[in-house]
Each structure stands twice: as structure tokens, then as C-alpha cells.
Image (tube, coloured by chain):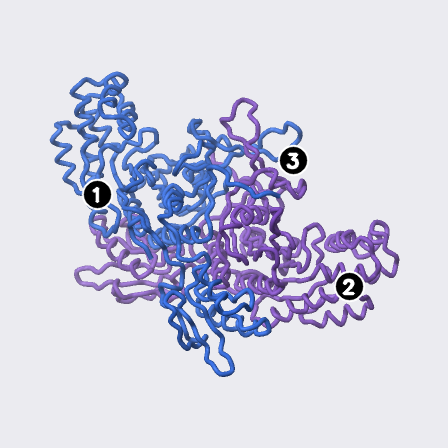
Chain colours: A blue, B purple
Amino acid sequence: MSRPTPLSGFPELLPAERNAELYVLDHLRRVFELHGFASIETRAVETLDQLLRKGEIDKEVYVLRRLQAEEGGADSGLGLHYDLTVPFARYVLENSGKLEFPFRRYQIQKAWRGERPQEGRFREFTQADIDIVAKDDLAFHFDVEVAHVMAEALSGLPVPPLRLGVNNRKLLEGFYRGLGVDDPAAVMRTVDKLDKLPAERVADLLRAEAGLDVDQTNRCLALAQISAADDSFVDQVRALGVEHDLLDTGLDELAEVISAIGALETGSVTVAADLRIARGLDYYTGTVFETQMAGFEHLGSICSGGRYDALADDGRNRYPGVGISLGVSRVLVPLIARGQLTASRSVPSAVLVALVDEGSRPDSNAIAQSLRARGIAAEVAATAQKFGKQIRYAERRGIPYVWFPAGLESAHQVKDIRDGGQRDADPSTWSPPDADMTPAINTTAGGEAQ
Amino acid sequence: MSRPTPLSGFPELLPAERNAELYVLDHLRRVFELHGFASIETRAVETLDQLLRKGEIDKEVYVLRRLQAEEGGADSGLGLHYDLTVPFARYVLENSGKLEFPFRRYQIQKAWRGERPQEGRFREFTQADIDIVAKDDLAFHFDVEVAHVMAEALSGLPVPPLRLGVNNRKLLEGFYRGLGVDDPAAVMRTVDKLDKLPAERVADLLRAEAGLDVDQTNRCLALAQISAADDSFVDQVRALGVEHDLLDTGLDELAEVISAIGALETGSVTVAADLRIARGLDYYTGTVFETQMAGFEHLGSICSGGRYDALADDGRNRYPGVGISLGVSRVLVPLIARGQLTASRSVPSAVLVALVDEGSRPDSNAIAQSLRARGIAAEVAATAQKFGKQIRYAERRGIPYVWFPAGLESAHQVKDIRDGGQRDADPSTWSPPDADMTPAINTTAGGEAQ
């Protein structure tokens, strides 16, 4: 068989790169669990009617067919999920009698879309979602909670600075209604295009398609320009002279999210009210989130979400939810591809135990096993080459320590191959510094590293 | 939307059950990493020519088609992988210039087969594989290593007693050749049926299909009856009076694996030479493994593998490998379905911080955040119900501790709701016992539990 080539849109990582990804996934899980979010996984497939029930025909769904199905066999009626929200909504309905509400869950899984691949957009990708869902009513403080948890999770990532922008659809709808706009949803969809079109062009569309007059258009665009890392945005909105009850509610809610999160230590993550965010194509009804990564704005939002008044509905009960979804592959794969993120070693091993000769392999195994019993990852050299070659073996894998077993006239010794320092050591008590226990993260991307 | 129903063959877990699975997956990962095995993940899809290249048309492959493909659009040429070995072989060839050999990897991922579902056989399932692959030559001690690592991993699982059986295809082939058999592979395929057919029926087949005479048949069946937890099997084989160089090699190798692993502490796992194991349909060339779970023998082998002389081959280099694959879903889903395995709580939270009134939510949040800073998972009550109801809220989720914030005349107090004990505590120093930090595993299945 000749050498296979990569499949476009299906990124795979080399072992050292995977160690960087594992560091990120472990960190996310730790933060989510500290906040009481339960792990679930859903199956990779959903029925096509579930996948398409919101008329999401723009999503490029992969449909499954059994190869052994009869000639011209029909599709299985199953497709791969394209996000983790549709499966979660189905899981909540299917298990509603067995879940405790409010139900906090995190879900870190692959999803698939048959789209044309480009940087940060893949056919197979990993998402990390948190959501809180309740039965019938979900108090507003849960909006603050998901924003807080995700900001804390993002702040520990070895990535460039992130800006988590928050807005509120009630604020937008109230503002538009207060201006006398008949179809606020049409305005949101148009304002949403400020990412891709110049403001003048969006102004043209607001007049031509949403039917706004010049004053309405100007104030809608003025609103979209407001952003602030504290609640000063409230006065800026008031200064535009629009009044509506729903606007008041939206301003209160947004101010509460910003105040609550602004007060936290969020490391390299900036949280700000950003009144441009509309998420016009999604089904949000209150708080909405988007996140930009510095230097990677062309990727679009890498972490988005918001509140749904009805994440799911089974006819008897309604399940409102609020959640936020991090595009793990969208963030990591471009950084890794550019060489801005990897790990210090391609193996978990902190120690390579050298081999004096093949006959003494049991001795070297016993040393390794003694280290492992204290949580130190260790492997034994593959062959009894000269020690210089065994050190090179460790070096090529990034293993920081080589252990030389005791001989007739010498004690056990351990060498830090980075500085060459070598000293006597006891396999039943020696430990490396904590920082060497697991692969270190190498990043030139700013943010925190291990 | 009406309530969705489960899809046969696509098991999903409730949160407490998922906590039991996570415990198992974390344990496997920890053991694999302590032994220097690197994590990789491969994409879920392979090209159909990769999936079918060994003529594996008995595997029910799921083929992908894009829903938006042109009318009558062709398949994508991609299918979901049905195991982790085919993808790993492809990954090794694709990245051979970037990997360090010998290369140890573990891979814990889903796989898919469009088979008829039954207990322990699913259409979507999780596998945990370890393999060691080298370029050109792979020393025999790696066979011992993978057996050792998997035995150690299995021994920490909260499952019924396991029996890891080991055999050697060189031993079988040498024995059959020493008996004068022309087609040892045909004999192996027939002996492999001893799982499903009575010995007399297998004897008939050996004579009718493999062309053996009565003496050959009797000695083949006598060989298959030999098993031992130490190297006493060697004398038993010798007593059958067959001689062949390949038999000698096979006996030496098998004795070495059994001696090396028998000497380890392997908890509830028994390791034994079992000369019945043939794995007749696979491409193994030396050591072979199978594992039975006590009381669940009808599931077949739950952990199997062996040595391939050519895991992969790109025309320039050959990549021999040895590996073993644990059917995580095959083991866990039946235990969970029978109520023999779950976790003590449905959430990660060790503590529920009670809420005095909605206005003091920031105080309760601060207490929870103080606990989290020391690694204690905590959540704050959803509403300021009466404390009795908040305790019930914790109980229903299996959260062991409820924290009552300090009042004007009272100190902070923490209550263990299992025994009702309540005492003063400081949120900046109090910790639960280690055993309460994470969900405990509830098992009636024997084996170790947390």
C-alpha cells in the first residue's frame, strides 16, 4: 500500500500536538466539573427528522447508509450530528423523567458537517458545550452562571487573548420596537452583517430591506457601535433617546451579566458588553454570546451561545435553556498548524529507564514500575544500545530524565538531559519537579501556559 | 415534538452511569500513560478502500453521503471506522516520517458497525486500544509489555473477575506442522469454533474439512484443552509427543509472557496460557489474547489482540505491531443495564451551597468559588427554598454535603446529609474526605471499586 494522504477537513494531530489538545480538554473538563456540570455524551447519529426539524437545510448533514444494504438500499434515516445542541435537546426530552432539573451538563464531542473546508472550519471538529436547562422556568441568574463558567474556562487556555462579547436580544428588540420598527427580527438579521459588510452597506440594507427611515437607521447603527467592559453602556444606550419596557429589561439583564463577570479574575479573557452582537440566524431570546480571538478574527466567533426560551418542548413541558459552545478545533487546529502551540514531548513518559543489557531488562522494568507506583510515567529503553544512543532516544521524544540502573560499584543515577545534571537517586523515593510530571505546553500564542 | 425513543444499538448513559464510565476511562488512560503510551485520536472516517482493503466485507460499514449532494448524488467514498486498528495502521503510514519508533499509543474512541444489535454488540461502541509498532523489527519483549499493561489496566476496573487468556500462533502452527498437517490455518479456523460447537462436532470438521486423521484430530483437541496459570503447560504440550522448531519457539514465547505477567499483582485479573485460543479469522502471527468476564461469557471475548508481523506496509518499510483492544461498551453497558454498575451521584458536585435568600446569592457564590479554588466541586442552590427542600435537592443528585452560609449569629456550617452530622466550617480551609471529592463507584459486580 502506498502512503496515504490527509483528508481535507478532517484534521488529525501528531502525538505532541495531541498532548496540547489533551491539556486543553482536561482544563475545560476540570473547570466545568468544579462548577457542578455533569458530563454526558450522546450518540454520533440522530434521526434525519431531528437533524432537520428546525429547517436547518443550510447545514451539510452526512447521512449514513449500510454498505451491505440491499442493492440501491435506502439510507438508514440517520445522519451524523452537526452540533451538540440538537442532540442535547433530544436527550433532555428522551430522559426528562430521569433527569434532575435544573440540569447542568457539559459535553465535549466531535461533530460533522459536509462543508467546504477552510481555516478553522472542518468537516470533523470537536466542540465543548455547557448548558443549563430547566423545566418550565429558568431563572436569569443561570445566564450569569454560564457566562462566568465559560469565561473562567477560557481564561486558562494557552491561546491568544480572547474577548467574550455579551449582548441581549430583549435589549435589541426593545430598542427597535421603541424606535417604531415593525419587524425587529429583520433588523437583527441585517445588523448581524456588520461582521462582513461596511456600515454604509448595512445602512442601505436597513432602509431598503427592513424599511427603516434615516433616523431609525442611524440610531440602530449607533446602538451597534456601543461596547464597554462595565455597565457604562447603559447610559450610552439611554443617550440615544429610545424607550421601551423590553429595552429596560434587556439593559438590566446585560448590566447584571457584565457586572458579575467583570468582577471575576478572568486572566487573558476580556468580557464586554458588545451591542453589535445579534446572532440573527439563531433562536436566542435573551442573553447572547460571541468570542473573538486576537489575531484570529477571521475565524469568526470561536465561542458562542445564548438563552433559548424553548431548548426543547414535548407538548406537555417546555425546557428553557442557556448555554455556550466552544469550538475547540476552530481554536486549536489553526494555532497548531502555525506552530504556535504544541507540547514539550510526544509521550507521557517523564523518565526513560536505561537498559544495561537485554538480560537486565527485569531490573529496568522494576525501576520503572517503582516510579509508576508513585504516579511518574516511565518507559524502559527499547534496546540495550550505548547509553549515548539511549539518551538520544529520550531526547527525540522530549523525555526529560534518563535513569541509569545501579551497577556493582555505582548507585542508581538520574540525569536531567536538558542541563546534563546527573545525581544519585532512589527509585522508591525520587520524583521529578511537578512541572515535569506531565508534558509542558509550548505556546507562542500568549495566554497562560503550564 | 413528542418524546423521542432510544435507537437500538446506540447506547446512551444517564449522568450517574456516565460518571461510572468516566471513572473507567480515566483509570485506563492513567495506566496507559504511566507506561508511556501516547494518546492519539484518528478521524471517525476512512476511505472505503482503506476500510475494505483486507477484504473485510463481513464488517457492516456505514458509508457517508452528503445530504446536499446533487440528486442521486454518489457516496462520499468515506465510511465510519469499524475498529481502531485499520485507522491506526493508516495513521502510522501517513505519519511514518514524523513518528518515533518503536511507537506506543493508546486510543480510546468510538467505532461503528451496522450489525444487528444484541447484548454487548452495538452499532456505536467505545474501544480502548493499546499498540506498540516498530519499523522493520519489533522485539518480542513488547508482546510481554502490552499484556502486562492491559492486565494492570483491567485489574483496576469495577467489573466481575476477568481471565486474560494468552496463546501463541507459532506454537499452534508448529504443533500442527509437527503433526504433519498441510494447512495449519484451516485447522486454526476450525479449532476456533470450540467456543460455539461441542468438541465432537469440531472433531468431525477437523476430519471432514481439514483432512486430519483420527490421531491428528485427537492430539489437536488435546492441545486445545491445555491451560495453566504458570509454565506447567509446556510439559503438558511436550507430553503430546509432537516436535517442531516453530513449536519450540512458540512454547518459549508463551512461557515468557505467562511468567512475566503471573509475577505481577493483577488484582481481580487472572492471566493464563490457554491453548484453545486461535483467533482464526485474524491476521496474528505470534502471541494472541482473549479475555472472558465471569458470568458474562456469552459476550465472547471482551479484550483481544495479538502480534501482527505487518500491521502496516508501504512498500518500502514494514511495520510490525502488537496490541490489544478492550471493548469498553461491551463490558460496561451490560453491567449498567443490569444495575450492577453506577456512581453515587449524578453530578460532579461534592457540595451544595445553600441559599438564604435570592439577595445573598453573591455570598453563596463566593463560598462555592472558595471551595472550587481548592479543587472541591460545588454548586449553589437554584432557588432560596426552605433548607429542607434544598437538602432534598442535594439528596436527589447524590451530593453528600450541604453548606449553610454564616448568618448574623451563626458560623458557616456544613452538613453530611448521609449521617446528618453538622458542624462549623471555614470555606477557605474545609475539605471533604478524599473519597467524597469525586463520585464513588457503586458496583455489585465484584472487582475493585473506588
From the top left corner, tell me how far across and down residue B398 is, in percent: 40, 56
Contact between labelled residues 2 and 3, with CB atoms less than 8 Å apart: no
At horizontal 47% and vertical 43% (from top left) the residue drawn is A42
The residue singled out by tag 3 in the image is: A68
Q: Secondary structure at mark 3?
A: loop
The residue singled out by tag 2 in the image is: B223
At horizontal 46% and vertical 47% (from top left) the residue drawn is A13
Other residues around mark 1 within 10 Å, as few (<14) / some (14–19) / many (≥20): many
From the top left corner, tell me how far across and down residue B155 is, in percent: 55, 64
| C-alpha gap between disc 3 and disc 1 | 55 Å
| C-alpha gap between disc 1 and disc 2 | 74 Å
Of residues B380 and A342, the one nearer the viewer is A342
At horizontal 73% and vertical 70% (from top left) the residue drawn is B234
Other residues around mark 2 within 10 Å, as few (<14) / some (14–19) / many (≥20): many
Residue A297 higher or lower than A434, as above or below? above
From the top left corner, tell me how far across and down residue B26 is, in percent: 47, 57
Residue A81 higher or lower than A387, as above or below? above
Residue B4 higher or lower than B134, as above or below? above
From the top left corner, tell me how far across and down residue B18 is, in percent: 47, 51
Q: Secondary structure at mark 2?
A: helix
